[in-house]
């Protein structure tokens, strides 16, 4: 069958995607019209659209540094080593030895994630290409696409796999037989990587491989009845519903639409549509991609139950199940909020993949319904989860970011780990520019305070943001335009700032005492007009609702961590291979200061310590505890949550 039919323009498709794919230029050969669509997508037009990442520039900041570290890592990796098992499964001779860790070692055989890294790598290279136009990333994408096409030709199938048993494992899974592994989860990464390569890097070859793989999936799943399909979905399957919804939007092929609905796990969907929180005990990162998929199915079909399920899930996780850092879960699983005290100090809390996927969901929902609460959650998790996850010296990333007092961040090795969070980590730091700015009808939303600039081509205008945030709670925005224009600048007044003052060319034009909303500044703008947004950052705290004596201290959106030094650590002790041993590495007893008293009084006693965003707080024994933003902690022990003693 021919799935390569185009149902809408690529710019229109990408404008409706809230999952991380960014608006690109139309007219790519990868999206040439081949025939009329089966059924035009009934896409829901979002209230906002994203800017093409190629129209956003990052200026000097920790975010640009993190991007450059990841870019360098991507270029150090050898695609042929990631392709090793794909060629083996297709009966072809490998071109390079396979990487270690989750890509090959027997220790991970019960997961069977071999090959997942290649999908993440494709997505990361596509994001890097879109951001930098460095042809080396595009060349790697084309090489991988050609190799996967060769595998399809050799195997005489659209299926490409790298995990043990390959097609045979999937056949058993589709037949309802017991299996060891998560084949659809792993395949989802390949689907998503090829999608991003096609949409962001203009890769016609990637699109062709993707369509063959997608059509294989349609044919393979067709014999299953609804009960059999639902049983298959009990095993982790990533965001397969999202990918097939994207394919439907790309091609108009109704088979893809139908399969996106079938891949929407009813055991998860149905309770959420009834506003029932049934998440206790479920594997967290199995669920979040499904929910992003629910929202994408809503966007492509207009069926509101999918949207309603996604909204309830987001409210449940963001408001009642998240730590101060924006992370959630313990040992990869949701737990009852009433039991948070038993989980908050685990070294296996806050899996970084979960934060990655929650931000993808948040972004999608924000485009559909631009509420400041989404922007606040995104900012909090971006700083305290995503930026905090990268080793600023090596570019490697964390798996868990637990709050065990006196523990440390542990980073993957360059070639012998390849955890799921290694893969999402490749993507996280090359797409910071995708959620700083958004656009509506003659309105430009400023969502994040990051040094950057954006070209608003439709309006014939550019905006440059100059800021030292979060070192200073002020940002400046300067317009460049050829002729005066009446536009709206929507500025986020974060929930963490009691007040916000807006000045235009030095004169105060608006003052807000209502945090958690967007301040609309509408006027005729002229070239060189400058807007200043002044916010208020101050120390605060977040207590565990079910255990009010357990608190984290904050400063604006930042979690302040106790910087506890390197007691018992040697250089390199925080670089590890096996994520399952988190909590065991470097686990010698360590002295952690005791804090005592009322949390509000303690927050009020936090004092600046000279350097920007460095503070001190007196412990119960009088010693000074140094507090710094959690995202700046690396290579030392820390504490983010504190169990307070009575004063």
Image (tube, rainbow, N blue to C red):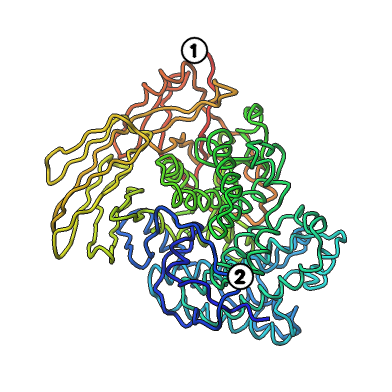
Question: Residue at label 1?
Answer: 647
Task: Residue at 50% x, 46% y: name it.
Answer: 385
641 left or right of 330? left
405 left or right of 487? right
Q: Residues within 10 Å of mark 1 (few under 14, many from 20)?
A: few
- Disc 2 on helix, strand or loop? helix
Q: Is residue 467 above or below residue 552?
A: below
Task: Residue at 54% x, 36% y: name it.
Answer: 323
Horizontal and vertical percent position of residue 145: 58, 80
Horizontal and vertical percent position of residue 484: 14, 59
Which label belongs to residue 341? none
- Disc 1 on helix, strand or loop? loop
**Do we see residue 238 in this rendering?**
yes
Choose the circle earlier in sequence order: 1 or 2. Answer: 2
**Residue 645 in which image quadrant:** top right
**Residue 499 in which image quadrant:** top left
**Do we see residue 632 in this rendering?**
no
In depth, the one of 630 and 214 nearer the eye is 214
Question: Residue at label 2?
Answer: 118
In this rendering, which labeled residue sits more in front, label 1 or label 2?
A: 2
Q: Residues within 10 Å of mark 2 (few under 14, many from 20)?
A: many
In depth, the one of 149 and 621 nearer the eye is 149
């Amino acid at each position: 069958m021919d799935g390569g039919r185009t149902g809408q323009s690529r710019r229109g498709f990408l404008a409706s995607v809230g999952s991380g794919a960014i608006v690109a230029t139309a007219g790519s050969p990868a999206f040439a019209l081949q025939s009329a669509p089966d059924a035009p997508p009934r896409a829901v037009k979002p209230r906002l659209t994203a800017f093409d990442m190629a129209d956003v520039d990052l200026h000097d900041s920790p975010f640009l540094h993190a991007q450059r570290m990841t870019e360098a890592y991507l270029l150090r990796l050898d695609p042929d080593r990631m392709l090793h098992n794909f060629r083996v499964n297709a009966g072809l001779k490998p071109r390079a030895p396979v990487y270690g860790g989750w890509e090959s070692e027997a220790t991970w055989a019960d997961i069977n994630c071999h090959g997942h890294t290649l999908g993440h790598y494709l997505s990361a290279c596509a994001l890097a290409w879109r951001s930098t136009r460095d042809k080396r990333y595009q060349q790697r994408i084309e090489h991988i696409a050609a190799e996967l096409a060769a595998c399809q030709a050799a195997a005489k199938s659209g299926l490409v796999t790298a995990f043990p048993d390959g097609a045979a494992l999937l056949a058993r899974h589709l037949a309802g037989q017991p299996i060891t592994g998560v084949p659809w989860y792993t395949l989802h990464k390949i689907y998503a990587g090829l999608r991003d390569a096609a949409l962001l890097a203009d890769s016609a070859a990637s699109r062709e491989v993707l369509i063959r793989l997608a059509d294989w999936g349609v044919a393979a799943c067709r014999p299953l009845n609804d009960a059999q399909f639902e049983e298959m979905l009990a095993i982790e399957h990533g965001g397969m519903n999202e990918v097939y919804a994207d394919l439907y939007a790309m091609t108009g092929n109704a088979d893809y639409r139908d399969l996106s609905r079938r891949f929407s796990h009813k055991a998860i969907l149905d309770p959420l549509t009834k506003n029932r929180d049934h998440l206790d005990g479920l594997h967290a990162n199995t669920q979040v991609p499904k929910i992003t998929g629910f929202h994408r199915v809503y966007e492509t079909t207009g069926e509101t139950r999918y949207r309603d399920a996604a909204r309830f899930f987001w409210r449940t996780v963001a408001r009642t199940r998240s730590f101060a850092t924006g992370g959630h879960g313990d040992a990869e699983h949701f737990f009852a909020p009433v039991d948070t005290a038993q989980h908050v100090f685990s070294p296996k809390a806050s899996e970084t993949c979960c934060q990655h996927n929650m931000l993808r969901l948040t972004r999608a929902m924000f485009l559909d319904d631009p509420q400041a609460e989404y922007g606040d959650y995104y900012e909090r998790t971006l700083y305290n989860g995503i930026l905090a996850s990268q080793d600023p010296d090596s570019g490697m990333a964390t798996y868990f970011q637990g709050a065990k007092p006196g523990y440390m961040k542990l980073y993957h090795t360059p070639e012998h780990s390849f955890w799921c969070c290694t893969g999402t980590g490749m993507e996280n730091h090359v797409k910071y520019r995708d959620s700083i700015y958004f656009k509506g009808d003659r309105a430009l939303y400023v969502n994040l305070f990051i040094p950057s600039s954006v070209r608003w081509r439709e309006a014939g205008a550019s905006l440059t943001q100059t800021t030292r945030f979060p070192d200073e709670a002020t940002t400046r925005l300067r317009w460049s335009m050829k002729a005066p224009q009446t536009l709206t600048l929507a500025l986020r007044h974060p929930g963490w700032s009691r007040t916000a003052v807006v000045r235009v060319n030095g004169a105060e034009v608006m003052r807000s005492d209502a945090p958690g909303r967007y301040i609309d500044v509408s006027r005729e703008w002229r070239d060189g007009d400058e807007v200043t947004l002044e916010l208020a950052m101050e120390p605060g705290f977040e207590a565990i609702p079910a255990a009010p004596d357990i608190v984290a201290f904050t400063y604006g959106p930042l979690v302040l961590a106790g910087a506890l030094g390197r007691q018992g650590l040697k250089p390199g002790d925080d670089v590890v291979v096996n994520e399952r041993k988190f909590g065991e590495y470097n686990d010698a007893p360590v002295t952690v200061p005791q804090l005592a008293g009322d949390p509000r009084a303690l927050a009020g006693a936090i004092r600046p310590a000279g350097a920007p965003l460095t503070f001190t707080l007196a412990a119960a024994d009088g010693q000074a505890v140094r507090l710094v933003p959690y995202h700046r902690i690396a290579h030392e022990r820390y504490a983010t949550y504190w169990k307070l003693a009575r004063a």
